[in-house]
Image (cartoon, rainbow, N blue to C red):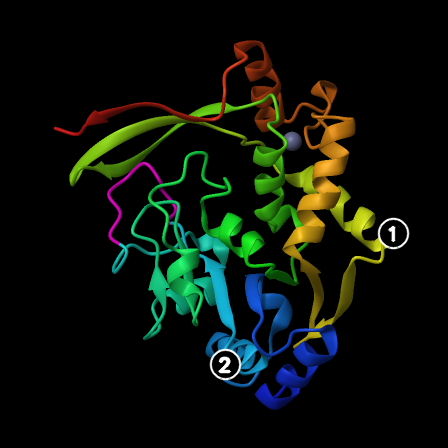
Amino acid sequence: MKREVLIDQAVAQLARLGVGPGDVLLVHTAFTRVNPLERGPLGLVEALTRAVGPNGTIVMPAWPDAIDGLYDPERTPSDLDLGVVASVFWQLPDVRRSTHVQAFAARGPDADRILMDALPLPPHRAESPVGRVHELDGKILLLGVNHDANTTIHLAEVLAEVPYGRELTCQGFVDGVPHRITYRENDHCCRRFRLVDSWLDEAGAQVAGTVGHAEARLVRSAAVVNHAGSALHDDPLVFLHDRNVGCSDCNAARDSLSDDLPLGLISSEPLV
Ligand SMILES: [Zn+2]
């Protein structure tokens, strides 16, 4: 059995990694890799909160499983794929959650600014939670997950104006009335986002370490956007699997190339 890591020890691990007072920290984590940790998922949130201090802001994804359904920011569970820490975090006192379905949650002095935008389309554009974290020169912490969980790479795709975009739907409010919204998003399987890991390592742009028992990576949002953006400049399809790999998500993204349409809103219809 692995020994239980104490919260004090996790705070020290985070500090060694480079998490510091006042940081804006976007966290993606798989708690099964971090465990066992004193007080479980709540203990990790406490360690993160202490590591950034009272002037720091913690941010986590908090969107629901079915984005094409009614969403209540105070009740709708977050997607199980986002993990137990994300699920615990948005429900804590003083944590704010987006009023729209492409939701993130945040706590700290920059929370309002990070969550201020109306429904962003595509979801990871500049005027979105990941965009605001980038604007605030925030850092990204990956705990027990790799860059295929790093949604900031989608921001790099949007800024690079990638030529693929799949047609998706979600529900949102227009003038207070629920609408079914159709939009184009730079969506695919994301597995090739792992390429970014080696690019950042080669450039010495990320720090690796351990938090709890998990492999941890800490990187500036700006470094992710710059390195992914530069690769997209050289090859706009770098993150899509080759067609012969048979990845249905990436092949659908490749099928969209001939549409030659911009990312973002297509149409919205009131729900009856
Ligand atoms: Zn794929």
Residue at 75% over, 45% down: 196
Looking at the rendered image, the quarter that the C terminus falls into is: top left
Q: Which residue appears at 52% of the width and 50% of the height?
A: 130
Residue 3 pos. (x, y %): 67, 86
- Give the SS element for disc 2: helix
Looking at this view, name the residue that lies furthest to the right. 202
Residue located 75% across and 37% down the image: 230
| Horizontal and vertical percent position of residue 39 | 49, 84
Residue drawn at point x = 59 percent, y = 15 percent: 257
User: Which residue occupies the foreground of this view, 171 or 265?
Assistant: 265
**Distance from label 2 to label 1 (Cα)?**
32 Å
Dividing the picture into quarters, in which one does residue 102 lie?
top left
Kindly identify the amino acid type of the residue bearing the numbered disc 1. Answer: Glu
Residue 57 vertical position relative to residue 246 in the rendered view, above or below: below
Please give the range of residues in magenta: 64-72
- Dot 2 corresponds to which residue? 46
* Left-right relation of 56 to 177: right
Residue 255, located in which quarter of the rendered image?
top right
The mark total stands at: 2
Task: Note whether 239 is above or below 90 in the view shown.
Answer: above
The amino acid marked with disc number 2 is: Glu
The mark that comes first in sequence, 2 or 1, is 2
For label 1, the residue is: 202
- Which x, y percent locates residue 90? 38, 65
In the structure shown, which secondary structural element does the residue marked by tag 1 occupy? helix
Does the numbered disc 1 mark a residue whose Cβ is under 8 Å from ligand 1? no
Task: Please tell me which residue lies in front, 218 or 248.
Answer: 218
Residue at the extreme top: 258
**Image quarter of residue 252:** top right
